[in-house]
Amino acid sequence: DQQVKQNSPSLSVQEGRISILNCDYTNSMFDYFLWYKKYPAEGPTFLISISSIKDKNEDGRFTVFLNKSAKHLSLHIVPSQPGDSAVYFCAAGYLSNNDMRFGAGTRLTVKP
Amino acid sequence: DAGVIQSPRHEVTEMGQEVTLRCKPISGHNSLFWYRQTMMRGLELLIYFNNNVPIDDSGMPEDRFSAKMPNASFSTLKIQPSEPRDSAVYFCASSLWRAGSPLHFGNGTRLTVT
């Protein structure tokens, strides 16, 4: 049972434009959400997180938005750069522990 | 900081053989996780440990899979007997057992069962 869903397997954007990656979750008890980035032949690396008490968290070019009523979060990358090309995983879980559930990932391609 | 170390990086084996994947977590981390990545299901949590004790193994597919953590610096994931459908990339991750502590992943073991 997939509790975290990333419905877009791939996304292609032009360099300099905004990339928007989406994620939906089904468990309303989740209170902590993260995005990870994964390059080929490497493990995922932590990118940005947000707890359920906030609806936005920003770190440089990366912003995560959380809509609790819709059980939806998104990652915005602006401006997008070719080095951002990777697979992005959304994860959700509980702030009280580290039991995180991951989505299937979205492959982002940023074209020069 | 050497990061999470997994071995081997690649494993090719025949159906029915035993496979053992190894993981060394980051020193000082007290939580360890095993994930499996497939095209169909993405990253699935198989099992995780806190302070070397298995907390949740509900993601382990079946009895052919077992995991151990004999001490704070080493864990194994064993598949016996292996089947072609076990072919996937297996990731180990570690973290501090602390609210909001992100997972640190190893580079994975790509398992191919023929």
Image (cartoon, grey):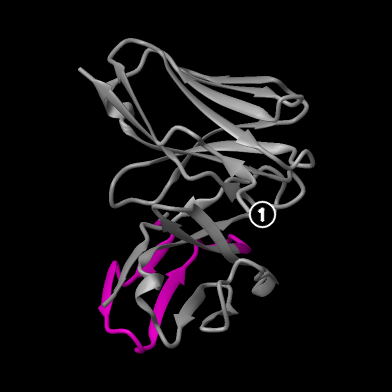
In the figure, residue A34 lies in which quadrant? top right
The front one of B77 and B38 is B38
Q: Quadrant of the C terminus of chain B?
A: bottom left
Amino acid, disc 1: Asp
Reply yes or no: does residue B99 show up in magenta: no
Chain for mark 1? A
In the figure, residue B72 lies in which quadrant? bottom right
Residue A86: horizontal and vertical position, in percent? Answer: 33, 36
Q: Residue at x 45, y 81 (%)?
A: B79
Q: Which residues are magenta?
A: B2-31
Crowd band around label 1 with a 10 angstrom C-alpha radius: few (<14), some (14–19), many (20+):
some
* Left or right, B31 with reference to A39: right
- Residue at image mark 1: A99
Q: Residue at x 58, y 71 (%)?
A: B60
Residue B40: horizontal and vertical position, in percent? Answer: 43, 53
The front one of B79 and A26 is A26
